[in-house]
């Protein structure tokens, strides 16, 4: 007979295993015992959780909902990713002049504490700002001593700020809302976050903002300086038509509520390829200037081919007047600028005005000669995407011809 032994959480080591054989009458005969020494699981990594909150008030401004204390947790795991419980982890502060711990039991103010992990392998400590410290940042360091090199990891920064970002004054914008990114890695768009407090004062330093995106890649965080900070979004294996980037930090949700505030921006994953262009007259013909508008759109290689999207920022419309001339002040070309409206647009448009060519016509009927003017406009457009890779060709509007002949 044989069986499989699996080491559990028993603290006894070595572990004793006893096998017995029972007779038909139920009497135990021929017992056998073996002891197995179980190797203790070894600490392999320390994992930091986000401090809660990541921004705390100075000690002299601590209030309900905006305290001067942050909770910091670290998880100790073994080689298989399982938590290690009842292990002592030491917490220290990288800048001991900014924050402090309060030792459990004694109540002493200290720069380091030892905390035992719980059943989930998590060690948690409370850290608070030191007296009279404002506009500063620090990190908590967790260390676990081993027979070899100690395990050590740092928390995300915790900031001490008297002023908090205010949700209605927390806004993210993109430099390029529609870059040429489909199927292309490494195309970048700078994102700038603008931040002020409830009084409209720009937040200055020591405020960390976290970023995440559902498409492409992004810098994970930035520090606000003089009311703003800038990160770079980059295309990476695009698979959806739009990316959503979200910035978040600890701030003032309203005049009375404090918590996590967010701002999001969307970016269109446009392309230089598959450009479709049309041009047509808009309204009635007019000898003082007839308006023509051109549209351009692209298709993405997605299952739904009925949808069209705006071409990339930097796409240029160039009007080609074959017969007639541009009206005074009318544009001969237009380049599409970055705008949030491009993200949901199915196409972009550019318009111009054209003065018709005039031909004087004389017609004689019997002894009567009549003179009238014939007006003609012929116009086309070429659409070129950034880099010149995508060009629509010269798309022509129907020729418009009319006259002022008296019936």
Image (cartoon, grey):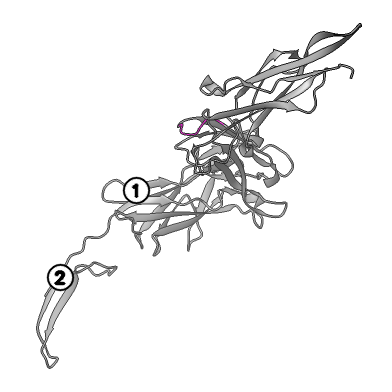
Would you say the residues marked 1 and 2 are in contact, meaning their CB atoms lie under 8 Å apart? no
Q: Main secondary structure of the magenta part?
A: loop
Q: Is residue 265 above or below residue 33?
A: above
Label 2, secondary structure: give it.
Answer: strand
Of 242 and 29, the residue lying toward us: 242
The answer to which quarter of the image holds residue 395 is: top right
Q: Residue at label 2?
A: 35
Q: Is residue 182 magenta?
A: yes
Residue at the bottom extreme of this rendering: 25
Bounds of the magenta span?
Answer: 179-184
The answer to whether any part of residue 171 appears in the image is yes
Residue in view at x 10 percent, y 78 percent: 32
Residue in view at x 29 percent, y 68 percent: 9
Decide which of tag 1 and tag 2 comes sooner along the chain.
2
Q: Quadrant of the N terminus?
A: bottom left
Q: Residue at label 1?
A: 151
**Residue 402: x percent and y percent?**
80, 19
Label 1, secondary structure: give it.
Answer: strand
Of 331 and 132, the residue lying toward us: 331
Residue at the left extreme of this rendering: 30
């Amino acid at each position: 007979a044989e069986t499989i032994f699996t080491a559990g959480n028993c603290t006894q080591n070595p572990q004793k295993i006893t096998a017995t054989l029972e007779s038909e009458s139920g009497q135990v005969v021929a017992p056998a015992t073996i002891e197995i020494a179980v190797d203790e699981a070894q600490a392999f990594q320390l994992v930091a959780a986000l401090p809660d909150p990541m921004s705390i008030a100075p000690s002299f401004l601590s209030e309900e909902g905006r305290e001067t204390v942050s909770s910091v947790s670290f998880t100790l795991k073994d080689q298989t990713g399982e938590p290690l419980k009842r292990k002592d982890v030491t917490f220290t502060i990288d800048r001991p002049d900014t924050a402090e711990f309060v030792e459990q039991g004694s109540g002493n103010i200290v720069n380091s504490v030892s905390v035992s992990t719980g059943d989930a392998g998590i060690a948690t400590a409370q850290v608070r700002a030191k007296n009279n410290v404002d506009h500063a940042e620090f990190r908590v360091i967790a260390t676990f001593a081993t027979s070899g090199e100690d395990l050590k990891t740092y928390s995300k920064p915790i900031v001490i700020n008297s002023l908090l970002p205010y949700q209605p004054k927390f806004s993210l914008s993109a430099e390029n809302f529609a870059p040429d990114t489909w199927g292309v890695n490494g195309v970048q768009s700078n994102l700038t976050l603008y931040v002020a407090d409830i009084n409209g004062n720009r937040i200055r330093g020591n405020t960390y903002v976290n970023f995440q995106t559902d498409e492409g890649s992004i810098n994970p965080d930035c520090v606000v300086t003089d009311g703003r900070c800038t990160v770079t979004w980059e295309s990476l294996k695009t698979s959806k038509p739009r990316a959503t980037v979200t910035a978040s930090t600890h701030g003032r949700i309203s005049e009375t509520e404090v918590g996590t505030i967010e701002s999001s921006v969307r970016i269109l994953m446009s392309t230089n390829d598959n450009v479709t262009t049309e041009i047509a007259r808009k309204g009635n013909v007019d000898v003082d200037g007839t308006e023509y508008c051109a549209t351009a759109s692209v298709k993405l290689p997605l299952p739904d081919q009925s949808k069209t999207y705006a071409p990339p920022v930097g796409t240029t419309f160039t009007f080609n007047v074959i017969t007639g001339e541009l009206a005074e002040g009318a544009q001969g070309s237009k380049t599409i600028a970055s705008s949030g409206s491009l993200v949901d647009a199915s196409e972009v448009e550019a318009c111009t005005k054209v003065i018709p060519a005039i031909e004087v016509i004389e017609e004689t009927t019997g002894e009567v000669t009549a003179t009238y003017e014939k007006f003609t406009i012929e116009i086309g457009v070429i659409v070129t995407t950034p880099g010149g890779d995508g060009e629509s060709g010269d798309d022509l509007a129907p020729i418009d011809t009319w006259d002022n002949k008296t019936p």
